Amino acid sequence: MCMLADRIMAAWALTTTALYTVILGVPLIFIAFFSKTGRVPYKLCRAWAWLVLKTNRVKIQIQGLNGINPDSSYIFMSNHASNLDPPAIAFTLDHTLRFVAKKSLAKIPLFGLAIRLARMIIIDRDDAQSAREAVNRAMKDLTGGVSAFFFAEGTRSLDGKLQKFKKGGVMLALKTKLPIVPITIVGSYVLMPKKTFRIKPGVVKVIIGEPIDVSQYTEDDRDILLDRVRSVISTTLEND
């Protein structure tokens, strides 16, 4: 009986998500051709996130949002344990975000085209040079509230535990001198672990840390800065 319920929930999640992708993806593609900043297409991405969460009865609890300025640009970095994380973040933050996404996502019909036109940062993990170039190209967009978002572990955790962080977000922050904002996502793994399609109803907490001023750091300090960001997220996970 439990297995049947899981299959029904998975079918519901997949069907409704695909439907929302078609309904919002088509106008997004059209609007993107006339949007120089990508702000309007991103609003449709946020609407997609809201629909996915609402349909699957996932509520978002937000902490610390008043500590950041919606008109300022940041480098956001968070943990990553579930496919629910991107919609939870899009729902939470008012900033126009440039999510760093793996190349395979860009190959998904319609969805891939939509995220490209919304100016997400598409990287090829098998080509470090190409990945760096993609991130560097995005630097010019990071102004007036437009911000970059890194899932610092690079991929979803298999067991929900925090993994080793990659340096991409820290390196971009050091190049742009934009503050890093550590974000801790709590509860998403329980609702939708990796390698599952069903989404359980429940609550996901998004805890926004205080911005970290990177002006005192150099590229030689990248490991120290990375450890600082990870420590904030790790401590928040342990205390929540």
Image (spheres, grey):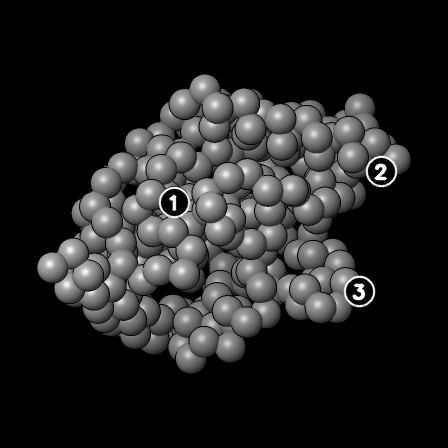
Q: Position of residue 53 (x, y in %)?
A: 26, 50
Kindly identify the residue that appears in the image at 54 percent across and 23 percent down.
235
Query: Sequence order check: which comes first, mark 2 or mark 3?
Result: 3
Circle 3 — which element?
helix
Residue 57 placement, left or right of 174: left
**Quadrant of the snapshot with the N terminus:** bottom left
Out of 90 and 220, give the one closest to the viewer: 220
Q: Is residue 37 above or below residue 167?
A: below
Q: Residue furthest top?
A: 239
Q: Residue furthest bottom?
A: 109
Circle 1 — which element?
helix
Kindly identify the residue that appears in the image at 41 percent across and 23 percent down.
240
Circle 2 — which element?
helix
The disc label shown at residue 189, or none: 1
Q: Which residue is mark 2?
A: 219
Q: Which residue is mark 3?
A: 129
